[in-house]
Image (cartoon, helix red, strand yellow):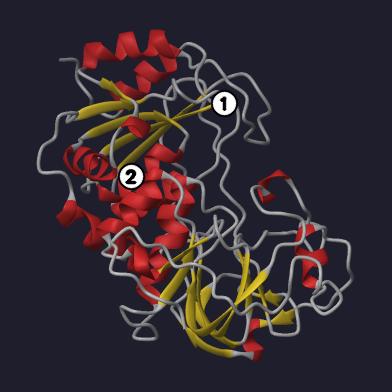
């Protein structure tokens, strides 16, 4: 068992008992090669071989094409996939990695539990060692915890949208399988991660930080499995969990409040309008205020979106905060030549009034990180189509 400290800043440390040293367990645990190099052959095993509880799976998304004005009316809907995650799995003496790869006690990857499942890709092609391995070594230690551990790690956990919609709702799937003392294996690094976990009432004493532990095993792993999948509806239960968890804890004061906002990507080097300054200046005519979301604390972001009436934004993680908005909120999403329907599906679930504008440069078949130009006339016509009058 882990020693606990009365110090509120205490972080759980790896126990003294380990199954292997840095190099001593390579032959006994080939998953080191499997996860960190992707070189070893293996046979994955289905989660259905383990004790699992099913959850209602999201239906196929059937929304019509969203509205747009001007010359950018082409819309590409995502292709729905058949396999979705919607279950909680319990694995005796299982093994979990800091990026959401889950193995049984024999080192076999468990298909349907590993996060994030790569749609359309076969194992082991994407199980490769990349730059994301830092700060961990090639052959990290495997730490053993003689108690149950909830695993909430995911390969996309550093991205705000995926943290909000793929990681946090999994806490609501535990259904009595864990109590307030059960340890949680999760990334605790970025400000939005720390703030959201604090707002959820998860004490530091419960957290096993992925920054400290790259691989762990436990008496039992409890792994809730969920993620937003292409071509599927946003699950109503996940939206309800986020709204119930954070709306009551929004910031009491709203120094950055505005009824009409533009989410700037000024601080982001990729996928932003090159003519953003021009767009921001012209949007002022409509009372639309530019906001850099990443500069706000999470309770302030929740407050901002709970009050907002109009949102204009380039495609980006800031739009994930729409989950805190009210039905009828007008949303105009900006894209380069290609689009993805992620936030349109979210807006449909929230009953928001969604529009889009696409640029004329870039690859029309694939959304890339490249910057682009927004045609002001197309945007202006779409604003008028949405019924937004100048101030």
Asked if marks 1 and 2 touch (Cβ < 8 Å), the reply is no
Q: Residue at x 82, y 58 (%)?
A: 37
Element on which disc 2 rests: helix
Residue 38 sits in quarter: bottom right
Element on which disc 1 rests: loop
Judge whether 361 appears above or below 236 on screen.
above
Location of mark 2 (residue) = 321
Please give the label number shown on residue 270. 1
Decide which of tag 1 and tag 2 comes sooner along the chain.
Answer: 1
Q: Is residue 357 visible?
A: yes
Judge whether 366 appears above or below 182 on screen.
above
The crowding category of the residue bearing disc 2, from other C-alpha atoms within 10 Å (few below 14, some 14 to 19, many at least 20), is: some
Q: Nearer the viewer, residue 346 or 323?
A: 323
Percent coordinates x, y for residue 146 in the rendering: 53, 86
Q: Is residue 188 left or right of residue 331?
A: right
Q: Nearer the viewer, residue 150 or 301?
A: 150
Percent coordinates x, y for residue 45 in the rendering: 73, 82
């Amino acid at each position: 068992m882990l020693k606990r400290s009365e110090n509120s800043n205490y972080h759980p440390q790896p126990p003294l008992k380990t199954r292997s040293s840095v190099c001593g367990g390579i032959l006994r645990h080939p998953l080191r090669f499997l996860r960190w190099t992707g070189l070893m052959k293996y046979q994955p095993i289905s989660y259905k071989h383990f004790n699992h509880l099913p959850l209602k799976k999201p239906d196929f998304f059937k929304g019509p094409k969203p509205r747009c004005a001007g010359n950018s009316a082409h819309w590409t809907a995502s292709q729905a996939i058949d396999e979705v995650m919607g279950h909680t799995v319990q694995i005796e003496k299982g093994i979990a990695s800091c990026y959401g790869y889950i193995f049984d006690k024999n080192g076999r990857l468990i298909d349907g539990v590993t996060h994030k499942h790569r749609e359309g890709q076969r194992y082991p092609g994407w199980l490769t060692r990349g730059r994301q391995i830092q700060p961990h070594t090639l052959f990290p230690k495997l730490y053993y915890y003689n108690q149950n551990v909830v695993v909430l790690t995911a390969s996309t956990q550093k991205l705000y949208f995926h943290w909000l919609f793929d990681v946090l709702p999994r806490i609501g799937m535990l259904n009595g399988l864990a109590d307030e003392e059960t340890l949680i294996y999760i990334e605790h690094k970025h400000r939005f991660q720390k703030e959201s976990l604090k707002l959820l009432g998860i004490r530091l004493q419960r957290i096993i930080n992925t920054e400290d532990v790259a691989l762990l095993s436990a008496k039992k792993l409890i792994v809730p499995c969920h993620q937003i999948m292409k071509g599927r509806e946003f699950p109503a239960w996940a939206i309800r969990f986020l709204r119930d968890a954070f709306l009551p804890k929004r910031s009491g004061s709203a120094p950055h409040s505005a009824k009409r906002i533009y989410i700037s990507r000024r601080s982001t080097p990729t996928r932003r309008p090159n003519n953003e300054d021009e767009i921001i200046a012209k949007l002022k005519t409509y009372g639309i205020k530019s906001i850099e979301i990443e500069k706000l604390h999470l309770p302030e972001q929740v407050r901002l979106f709970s009050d907002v009436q109009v949102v204009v934004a380039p495609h980006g993680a800031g739009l994930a905060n729409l989950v805190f908005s009210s039905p009828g909120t007008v949303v105009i999403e900006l894209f380069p030549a290609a689009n993805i329907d992620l936030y349109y599906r979210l807006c449909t679930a929230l009953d928001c009034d969604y529009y889009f504008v696409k640029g004329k440069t870039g690859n029309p078949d694939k959304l890339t990180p490249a910057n682009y130009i927004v045609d002001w006339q197309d945007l202006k016509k779409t604003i008028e189509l949405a019924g937004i009058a100048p101030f």
